[in-house]
Amino acid sequence: MGLDLGTSAVKCILVDDSGQVIGSHSVEYPLKQPHPGWAEQHPEDWWNATVKGIRALLEKTSVAGEAVAGIGFSGQMHGSVFLDEAQQVIRPALLWCDQRTAEQCTYIESTVGEAELGRLTGNRALTGFTAPKVIWLRQHEPEHYARVRHLLLPKDYVRLRLTGAFGMDMADASGTLLLDVAHRSWSQTVTERLAIPMEWLPPLYESGDVAGHLLPEAASLTGLAAGTKVVAGGGDQACGAVGVGVVRQGIASVALGTSGVVFVHDDTYQVDEAYRLHSFCHGVPGKWHRMGVMLAAGGSFQWWRNHFAHEELERAQQEGKDVYEILTSAAATAPLGSEGLLFLPYLSGERTPHPDPKARGAFIGLNLRHEKAHLTRAVLEGITFGLRDSLQLIRESGIEVTELRVNGGGARSPFWRQMIADIFGIPVITVNSTDGPAYGAAIMAASGVLHEDITTLCEKWIHVTDRVEPNVDNQKQYEAYYQIYRGLYGTLQHTFHQLSDLAGH
């Protein structure tokens, strides 16, 4: 069983011993935003949804609880779950997308030292990460901070409720800013300088390690068997990469969700000296990954759909079609380069390669010839250029990428897959597994139960279903547009900041 504890829902899947998915079920829960820029969830909501999801999945598939040999976890990264001595939740969890900790990030970098922090953790202090949230709690809610005895990430809290055992995997722990990523251990240097007690941090595991066994009371609630093995699992990005087979050097993936993630497997630990890429432990034991994150990839296309595709939405409803298929079909009628039109996809600010919350979106090059199809194509091209920025950094770091595996909603479009191949200049692959991080979590569970390594299981279970080669002529044309795109942020940065400040955000 693979469980993916996402930001909006938990997805539960069952996989047989040949790697076939035999059923899935999702249960949603709310996201709370008590102040602008804040994002919180109550861990009890995750627990209730997980119990409900497991029971519903067993019922839907008619699989007996005793037949489930192991459970693996994927989860939203960085969220802070604060527990007291009795293992009770002290306050709602602060999530990965919570932006309240800018001052705490500055404090961390000045206290630990930016270079030392980067060397040890592979990253700069970013508002999404866990350690800044701990400092925020100490500074703003001292009465809650005084009660803290345990610090967990979201999926690890649910696993605690299932097994009674504390634990965290290397991949998810890499996003806390408290892990010595090279040595795969908690960093004494960082914890001491930030005065975060080491005893708050749970034992560390590799992703396929068994981290606990199902408690009788949890078995009764879920319908599973007491004693069922539960493995450590991984953060959602590591699980998503395992779920499409990014487990060897030279293979990268692009996740086309609301955000866009370019993820590459790495056999060694290396740090981007400018910290434009994240360097984390991989879900593959003893391996690492580097990752570029674009904040509004599919989110930019969704914005375009929501505000400028009313006719297409009506047509999709009337004809029973996917509105995105209608939009991409129209975009395909516009010429490559959208007749000199570029789109900057910084609608939510940006992270890679420009860590700038004040970056803004823009259409550049509009003229009277441009119609909706041109603008739609420009949005898709702009998103893909933005993702290419992360690939450029990966290439500059010395990793040669020979194959790109795409997943997420955008991967369903043949038109977009061809565009990615042409703009990236490498073959684009789709595979038989389409359940993303939940499937990666199931592979990790199988590794712990079957005693097979994760890489071997991926090669047995995951198969290529489609391969798109770059069109050489298109590649040359796109290269010229991409070089112009790359220069736009530097040209417009000051203007973006002026407009952001004038608007008061």
Image (tube, helix red, strand yellow):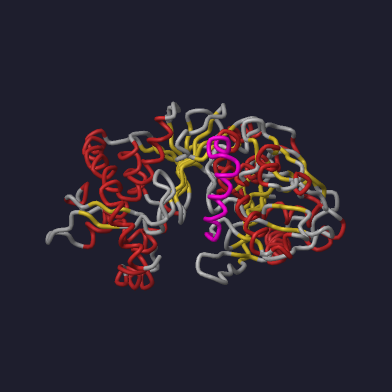
In the image, residue 449 above or below residue 309 = above
User: Residue at the right extreme?
Assistant: 216
Asked whether, in this view, residue 359 is left or right of residue 78, the answer is left
Q: Quadrant of the C terminus?
A: bottom left
- The percent coordinates of residue 331 (x first, y second) are 26, 55
Q: Quadrant of residue 419?
A: top left
Position in image of residue 179 (x %, y %):
65, 40
Q: Nearer the viewer, residue 405 or 338?
A: 338
Residue 411 is left or right of residue 102, and the answer is left
Residue range corresponding to the magenta coloring: 99-118
The answer to which of 385 and 145 lies nearer the viewer is: 145
Query: Which residue is found at the position 55% from the left and 53% from the top?
Result: 128
* In the image, farthest residue toward the front: 110
Question: Is 410 placed above or below 273 here?
Answer: below
* Magenta run includes residue 296: no
At horizontal 70% and vertical 50% (from top left) the residue drawn is 1
Which secondary structure is most common in the magenta stretch? helix
Q: Is residue 411 visible?
A: no
Question: What percent of the width, then of the height, locates residue 367?
Answer: 14, 59
Q: Examine the rendered structure and indicate whether residue 260 appears above or below residue 218.
A: above
